Image: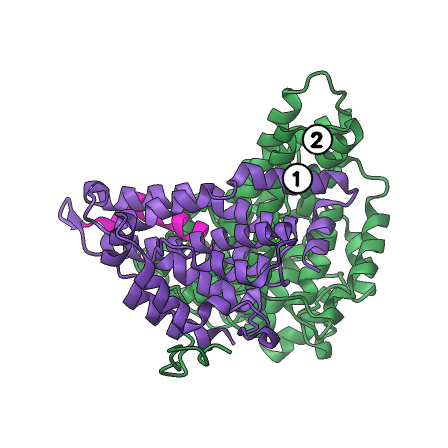
Amino acid sequence: MTSEFLEPFEQMLGEVFAPSAVRAIEAGEGSAAAMQTVEQSGFLDALVAESEGGAGLSLADVAPLWMALGRHAVPVGIGEAMIERATGDNEAARRENATALLHAALIAGAAGKLLDMAVAYANERVQFGKLIGKQQALQQNLAVMAQDVVAVRLAVELAASKGWPETAQAAVAKSVAAEAAPRIANTAHAVFGAIGISAEHDLNLYTRALHRWRLAGGAETLWSRRLGEEVLASSQTAVDWTRSLWA
Amino acid sequence: MLGCKGPARKPKSESTRRFRSFPLFDTLTLAAIPPEDDALRGKVRTLAQEAVADMSLAERSRSWSGFDAGFSRKLGEAGLLGLTLPTEYGGGGRGPFARFVVVEELLAAGAPVAAHWIADRQSAPLILNFGTEEQRQKYIPPICRGELLFCIGMSEPGSGSDLASVRTRAEKTEKGWLLNGQKIWTTNSMHSDYMIALVRTSGTSDDRHRGLSQIIVDLKAPGVDIRPITDLAGDAHFSEVFFDNVELAEDALIGEEGGGWQQVVAELAFERSGPERIYSSIVLFDAWLAHLRSVGRDDPATTALVGSFMAKLSALRAMSLACTGQLAAGESPVVEASVVKDLGTAFEQDLPLAIGDDLAAHPDEAVSEELQDALTYVTHIAPSFSLRGGTREILRGIIARGLGLR
């Protein structure tokens, strides 16, 4: 199901949200044209039931699309619109949890992009007469970054695997993603050095987005708290509680 | 439907390209425990609870260092060992997911698993993969019964992380092999029947990975001298093992002569990917949760701390299961296992520090002596979590190589 939609979706994002377009939207030049293309693609109805004219995709199907949005640092609320269209007025909690998962997925996507960029740069930038990627200190930092990237992606896949997430399920994804986001952004900047700080370099599109999505709708402390409240209110062991959360 | 409304293009190819561009991490994806394997849980839990009934919290916190040969035999009798091995050798004929369930239950209870641990996890699979039919028949059935205990001889005084520099040497003789040298930090060698040792069978340590072989050493053979080493917590779970002209039969060689390095690398994927890499502090974690519930503390700082660890636990368990899925598919997830082990051991190491800080910040609360003892033990032993089975720095090097940086 997923791969069938991911490729055309990514292709559309590549055309509509190239880095220059993202900058233009962020500079306040408007996103109406971009959103019109997205609207026409039908993807905004991805989560709407087929009986109501939507695509009837599950969250597990849609999570990779959300990660693709992160990968392109998309500055408009496409994922939010998908959720909005698939939830009713009296479903605020459902919307809030799904939105937390969305932000975690956006972080996962941008984080994967940053890892790609950082590794590629480490394999082309020369200092001290050799590629900086050959320096053990940098290798170890990039290895840690890769771990965070994988952990965030798995947390997102997990939270998306059981339908619309309960609060604790969404909290797992958002807590893990939000906590890792600044580490990932910082390592990316450390690898690129000064050039990554310059406005014209694309790196900051993704690192700034990480910080934005981390805080949106509550970061690691808020969602960890919600998770912790449920854990302490139960009498189960850590493993049993975790197993039953994903049963 | 998508596409009915607009230009949702048809996929151009069969490609299922994901958003990630490092293929090695794409293989790490959600995996679920098959219901028939999950069904083992009740049986393991009953046995584990029996075994720990009289153990203190600090003893249960020893996790996979706790030794009880009788308990391992009970697990064997119950058909809970050798689950990944074929039934023709007395195994369970199941797979890595069955083992995951059993290990998860044993570790969560703090059951003493050290006796069968190494043999069940890696020695038997190694013998199955690389051994002769005779070796399989000889060793695997008693391993599955929990009767034959193995240890692994890798480290030497001059070979820690730099494993390829091992100097212990097995020389070919008319009757078999003559073994000389020394291993160290060998877990449970004093209780084991056999050691699978990585030794040099040709060349010198300058030849690095070439000329290394794996040898099965009968630890009761003349010339083997085992001297336990006490650790900082007062336990003696590892030791020095000396080999002074130890004569071994020809069939002591396991696998290919000179193929030891490749065999060890395959073995390490088994060693590094299991749930034991996230659960070393789980008994302490549960004891702390029980303490918080009993004193009724659920202020925002406490719930945030609990939730942060629980979120990580969910993610780590999903990652460990993903690795298990790769093992089940016959893959050797060396890089992925390194990712899980490094993150998992960091989680295990963070827990005692956070719990200690949390309890110290609430001096008004009565903390049981038992919880205090367990906390002290785990705090002191935790640095070993990222040493045993490959150090953190080595694992990160493996990941860096996986990223294409080395």
Front-most of residues B203 and B281: B281
Q: Is residue A133 magenta?
A: yes
Q: Which residue is mark 2?
A: B298
Residue type at mark 2 is Asp
Q: Quadrant of residue B226?
A: top right
Most prominent secondary structure in the magenta stretch? helix
Residue B135 shown left or right of residue A207 in the figure: right
Q: Quadrant of residue A116?
A: bottom left
Front-most of residues B93 and B31: B31
Tag 2 near tag 1, CB within 8 Å: yes
User: Which chain has been coloured green in this picture?
Assistant: B
Local crowd size for mark 2, using a 10 Å CA cut-off: few (<14), some (14–19), many (≥20): some
Image quarter hosting the C terminus of chain A: bottom right
Q: Is residue B402 magenta?
A: no
- Residue furthest left as drawn: A129
Q: Look at the image and give the residue range highlighted in magenta.
A: A131-150
Q: Which secondary structure, mark 1?
A: helix
The structure residue drawn at horizontal position 69% and vertical position 56%, both measured from the top left corner, is B103
The structure residue drawn at horizontal position 18% and vertical position 51%, both measured from the top left corner, is A125
Q: Quadrant of residue B227?
A: top right
Q: Which residue is mark 1?
A: A228
Q: Position of residue B191 (x, y in %)?
A: 69, 49
Q: Same subunit under labels 2 and 1?
A: no
The structure residue drawn at horizontal position 70% and vertical position 31%, both measured from the top left corner, is B298
The structure residue drawn at horizontal position 39% and vertical position 72%, both measured from the top left corner, is A40
Front-most of residues B106 and B289: B289
Q: Position of residue B263 (x, y in %)?
A: 48, 67
Label 1 chain ID? A
| Residue B186 shows in this picture | yes
The colour assigned to chain A within the rendered structure: purple
Q: Position of residue A138 (x, y in %)?
A: 30, 45
Residue type at mark 1 is Gly
